[in-house]
Image (cartoon, coloured by chain):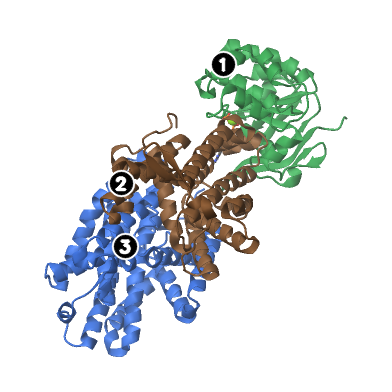
Amino acid sequence: MDWLNALVQGVLLGGLYALFAAGLSLIFGVMRLVNIAHGDLIVLSAYIALSFGVALGLNPLVALLLVVPTMALIGYALQRLILNRTMGEDILPPLLVTFGLSVILQNALLMGYSADPQNLQAGAIETASVTLGPLAVGLMPVMVFATAVAVIAALQWMFYRTALGRAFRATSDRQDVAQLMGLNRAHVFGLAMALSLAVTALAGVFLGIRTAFDPAAGGARLIFGFEAVIIGGLGNLWGTLAGGVILGVAQTVGAKIDPGYQILAGHVVFLIILALRPRGLFPRIDG
Amino acid sequence: MPDALLTLQALNAHYGDFQALYGVDLRVDPGEVVAVIGANGAGKTTMLRSIAGLLKNAPGAIRWKGQAIGALRADQVAGRGIALVPEGRLLFPSLSVEENLVIGGQLGRKGPWSLQRVYDLFPILKERRHQQSTSLSGGQQQMVAIGRALMANPELVLMDEISLGLAPVIIRQIYEALPGIVGEGLTAVIVEQDIAKALSVSQRVYCLQEGRVSLEGQSQTVPREDITRAYFGV
Amino acid sequence: MTLSVTRRTRLSTTWLILLVPIVLLLIAAPWWAGRADLRLMGEIALYMSLAILWNLLAGYAGLVSVGQQAYVGFGGYLFFALTMLAGLHPYAALPLVVLAGFVISAPVAVLIFRLRGAYFAIGTWVVAEVFRLSFAQISSLGGGSGTSLAPDIVRSLADGRDAREAVAWWLALGAAALVLGTVVWLLRSRQGVALTAIRDNELAARSLGIDIWRTKFTVYVVVSGLTALIGALIFLQKLRISPDAAFSANDWTAFVIFIVVIGGIGTLEGPILGTLIFFALRETLADLGTLYLIALGIVAIVIMLFAPRGLWGFLRDRWGLELFPLSRRVSGLAKKEA
Ligand SMILES: Nc1ncnc2c1ncn2[C@@H]1O[C@H](COP(=O)(O)OP(=O)(O)OP(=O)(O)O)[C@@H](O)[C@H]1O
Ligand SMILES: [Mg+2]
């Protein structure tokens, strides 16, 4: 029963990791950008929710209505003002610029909020639980998982069924020809980053409700998201969800063996999959 | 003389240190078909890419209805009503045939062209509309590239070697459709390797040689010797 | 017309002649510098080494790693283990650390080279985390809270505190010289030619028959082994090691990246200039703490956006400066062909 419980907890945790990963996957898909500051932006979202909570007395889940657009705006501005200047053949400038951003964000948060761990209080919903067969599982983790599924379904629909998704795919294929269709590359990239950080906002608030966070918490979140992307296979959103679940299960099962193995077990499973299936478990067939 | 639709005035183009165009002058009037010919590497593609906004230009080197558009980005040029059928087709591989056409019209300019009209012109595309664009034959891909440009309902279409690598039947089919396309207030600049073909479908012709205009004339009356000289520089 | 190819410039020749007295002066430092200054100079030498190594990796081989703290920490821990647990003399342990760095980084390279481009960067970070979490599990080295170097091992280096400080300095200076020498030698060798070709045009390099994977592999393994050596010396100076200090991403990667970016990535002089600037700023702005890191981050971003070859690249483009005779110059040609 304990093992089954660990398994279910791991699957649900995987939903959160898929949310970490979805934004990363999106911007890589559209503009081949790997954002080293992604984890710090997740943590930034949690702090923004915290501040809205303090200033306006909002439950963090309600604050999402403000945090999501705020992060989207930050994403658009970040892309248009800074990151678009680094986009080109050379991968070095975007990598180093987002790395610099990561350090700046971490230290700015440290100055603004101190190194003390913080927590988002969502109230009674945090302790509520639902019975799944023989198990009682927290309502929050189930909600997070359901949100992850919904977000990925929505992104999938957006990518393959809407004009915006068409613009994303066209720009990803051939930037200059997409310009000929009247698509402004800088704007399309800005929209992609806005969407990525909107998802990041969800991830950050859920993270903050689930565990304590501090300004240095971003690095690990970037890594978990990245591992979910690679395990699932680049360019496959549903694969990313599967990757998140595999990582989550590896961690909870690892923790079951020995609490010190939790994170390590996740990394080891990632490295094993990288060794055996370098393109991930569910790579996109083309490309 | 009517007001020109498009004028190039002393257009230069560079790739890094290399200069590909030297002071090119060119004029396109509304409703005409202008052919541009020239040997490989003469600068034809460069000229079309400059007009489309894919290369940086001096603002005044390119004028559209009298306005300087040389410094505009490609998407802004597209918004003014200029469409390019690029050399080598360059379809979007992750878009289906129909999506490739639809994205051509995504600026929403009004005009005679619609998905239905393109399918009427190239019926085979309707059959294949859900296929991935890269799974089509070369000729079919060329039809998509032309259709994609027409979907923008442009006032000027720039066509870069649309017959390259195609079977003669298909070339004939495409060029037979051209007068119909141009009929409805559309103006065209066509770049073509096949000189006879270029002359037969156009009213005026320019020849480029090593980045300079070496000849300008009426397609029907320009002497063949002049073209040979302008083309090969002998 | 006679053409001759040389790598030397007037400046680089003058510099090489100047180098001899500078080196002698540095070796004699224990006799003219105070204890605190000597420590600072040792730290500078070690940071400079890390910067030169990271620059070879990212600036020349295109392997942008944000996880070199893996090898700093590995070297530090291994040095503690070899001296305290295996009872080796520190001088015997140091070469073994380099060797172990080669041995451990080879399989790591095989694994993470499967990640393309930017994802490689995050892969290196995962490896560093795995190293950190693994060493935190080793209870004989203090587990998560770390351990101190046993006093008798410190004493085995030399008698008396001043003598030990001098030895620590000479070790740091020697390591920096070894690192610089290795990198210059590597860049002037066939590998160096291959690296330049790869950096300029990977596709063309491949068609010339250059084995890109092997070249990058060699660079990665050499850099990692030497980084482990620097790690050992860093923690020999600190006398104390813990997982968080040994595998600190801020200390061993963020600072190093900023140093290289500010000084000039992809130039050999850049990391040296960057280290000097970094320490000059740190010594004057030290009490700003967090703000100092933010400022460094902003400067690095601005440089990346507007002068991607850093300060040295800027100076070089302006005046054609070059301290190390690396690039080949052809003299006798009137002008470069387009
Ligand atoms: N991206 C580029 N970078 C550098 N030089 C280029 C580039 N594209 C074209 N050139 C050069 O510019 C000149 C003109 O090229 P362009 O493609 O315009 O010729 P073209 O007339 O279209 O030739 P073709 O008939 O072969 O298509 C050529 O010398 C070519 O080598
Ligand atoms: Mg051409």
**Apparent colour of chain B:** green
> Which amino acid does the dot numbered 2 rest on?
Val
Q: Which mark is residue B128?
A: 1
In percent of width and height, residue A137 lies at: 42, 44
Secondary structure at numbered mark 1: loop
The residue singled out by tag 3 in the image is: C184
**Apparent colour of chain A:** brown
C250, B190: nearer the viewer: C250
In percent of width and height, residue B29 lies at: 80, 28
The residue singled out by tag 2 in the image is: A253
Q: Nearer the viewer, mark 2 or mark 3?
A: 2
> Which amino acid does the dot numbered 3 rest on?
Val
Distance from the alpha carbon under mark 2 to that under mark 3:
48 Å
Dot 2 alpha-carbon crowd within 10 angstroms: few under 14, some 14 to 19, many 20 or more: many
| Residue depicted at 24% across the width and 83% down the height | C166
Q: Quadrant of residue C135?
A: bottom left
**Apparent colour of chain C:** blue
Q: Chain of mark 3?
A: C
Q: Nearer the viewer, mark 1 or mark 2?
A: 2
